[in-house]
Image: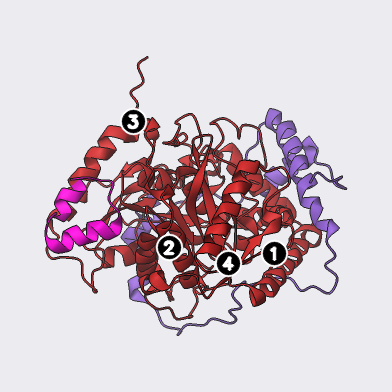
Chain colours: A purple, B red
Amino acid sequence: MANKTEITFTSESTAKIADLAKLKVEKKEENYLAKQFNQTLEVIDGLNKLNTQNIPETSQVTGLKNVFREDVVDKKRSLTQKEALSNSKKVHNGFFVVKAVFDSES
Amino acid sequence: MKTDLSLRKIIGLLQKGEVSALDLVKAYLEQIEAYNKKLNVYLSVNTKVLALAKTIHGKPDARYPLLGIPIAIKDIFLTKNLRTTAASLVLDDYIPAYSATVVTKLEEAGAIVLGKTNLDAWCHGSSTETSDYGPTKNPWNINHLPGGSSGGSAVAVATDLAPAAMGTETAGSVRGPAAWCGIVGLKPTYGRVSRYGVIAMGSSLDSPGPLTKTVEDAAIILNVIAGKDPNDATTSPTNFDDYTNELEKGVKDLKIGIARDYLLPNMDSKVKDLIISAAKLFEKLGAKVDLVKTLDPRFAISVYTVVQRSEVSSNLSRYDGIRYGRDRKYFGQEAKRRIMLGTFTLSTGYHDKYYKKAQKVRTLFIDDFNKVFKKYDLLIGPTMPGPAPKIGVTEGQAMFGEMADVLTEPTSISGLPGISVPCGFVDGLPIGLNIFGPQFSEGIILRTAYAYEQSTSWHKQKPVDFKKVIIL
């Protein structure tokens, strides 16, 4: 079901998406990925063959709505600080170490 | 101790005291030692498994229905203190601090986690080829794919490296590999089984389900894992009875539809013939069988691709390498492709065109099924359009999985349950019959699958190709 798409990916738009998704994509990968995204869009655009006027969007397939729980801490579900930190590569005084968010010079 | 027995038979032996949990674990470890390297089934074997088996006293009963039973778990379920990778190098050294609800329930029923099985990295695929640890091999012909994403679990059961295994299905990931490996795979209704502690792929689709040697075994496991979980708000409060009580009820009172549009125009006619033969058998067993028109399943490829990629981009944004795992540069090609396309379909300006449109067409599928299931109890069709293709076929194909799973995607996006049971062979490779029905119809699906299985002998055939010694 190949379809003509209105949108075409280029290496530039691929690089932009990679940046939004915080992924590192090599220059040589950009063209390859763009081509694959275009193939995928050709298939996806088949959706336009179906009329969905006045059709609501699905949000939850089994029809559940507003599932609440008591506002109390469930100790069984909580991790100890030691457990929570157990997989971190960099820990300092019981905290996760993260990279600086702002440039140090400004 | 033989390792080719069904769960039901093993439970019987344990109850009679003819084998112990330790005998079982030793036997499966031997089988793993003999074949795991060749087939690439387990990513981790539980080193504590012998010690655990030694602590088990008593026999399986109503309170502990799986006491002493070793079971394989797809490496997408968190297992406390046992490495869990999602078959991705991002989580290469991840040791979870808690277990998935499914794992906890199995352990509370007395089961022992034997090890963690291979999959497409993050469940992204239908071949097990996108695993960062290499593909699993199909035991019927080791040059072919086992299917995926629960490929390791399917092969573990098919080759007796485990009596039963847990998988997860987003669209076809339990039923597909079950079909290609010649075993039973059950995908429950969305929300029937908890997703808590299952590394998320498509949160509106993911459904954990068992891969087993027999239909009865699938019912036994579903009894243990089903039910509402306070840790997963999307689990359903819908009640259920013991699924094994349904099995003997037969199909005489049922109206079964052959999903006409699932016999695709370009499909191998030998696959179609097997489905028609199955339909005739149901008729012989007393069911009313008709050809039924449904919405073309090929539209589900588009819906599924958009919804799944969008949910993937959101779910995988949490992997930053700070609290656990490694940073985002370790994502493989397939994960990057999916995250990026999902980022695009959710981005400003394109959200309405893709995501909203897909969710509207999803409603069309749900409405169409609701209409069909007013007249019919169940539908049947092939699980996969053909037998397992050769290893390497997915290379460079951005949509391999979505195309391969065309016949399971409509049910997945609609939250429906389905089972794949062996229904014959094409070119020496197994084919699966997909039996699916309305939400929460697991009982009827299981008894229909059981009736089919008891009247055929496909499930008794075992792969031998993987046992051949290759002399280089």
| Residue B59 in sight here | yes
Kindly report the distance in space between the C-alpha atoms of the residues bearing marks 4 and 3. 37 Å
Question: Which residue: 61% across, 51% down?
Answer: A102
Quadrant location of the N terminus of chain B in the rendered image: top left
Q: Which residues are magenta?
A: B1-25
Image coordinates of residue B387 in percent, x first then y, are 56, 40
Decide if residue B319 is in sight here. no
Report, in whole angstroms, how far the alpha carbon at label 3 lies from the one at label 2: 29 Å
Q: Position of residue B68 (x, y in %)?
A: 20, 59
Residue under label 1, please give it: B292
Query: What subunit carries mark 4?
Result: B
Point out residue B404 in the picture as x, y percentages from the top left corner.
62, 45
The structure residue drawn at horizontal position 66% and vertical position 45%, both measured from the top left corner, is B403
The amino acid type of the residue labelled 3 equals Lys
- Tell which subunit mark 2 falls on: B
Reading the image, the residue beneath label 2 is B450
Measure the alpha-carbon separation of dots 4 and 1. Answer: 17 Å
Residue closest to the eye, B312 or B53: B53
Per the rendering, the mark at residue B416 is 4
For disc 3, the chain is B
> Which residue type carries mark 1?
Val
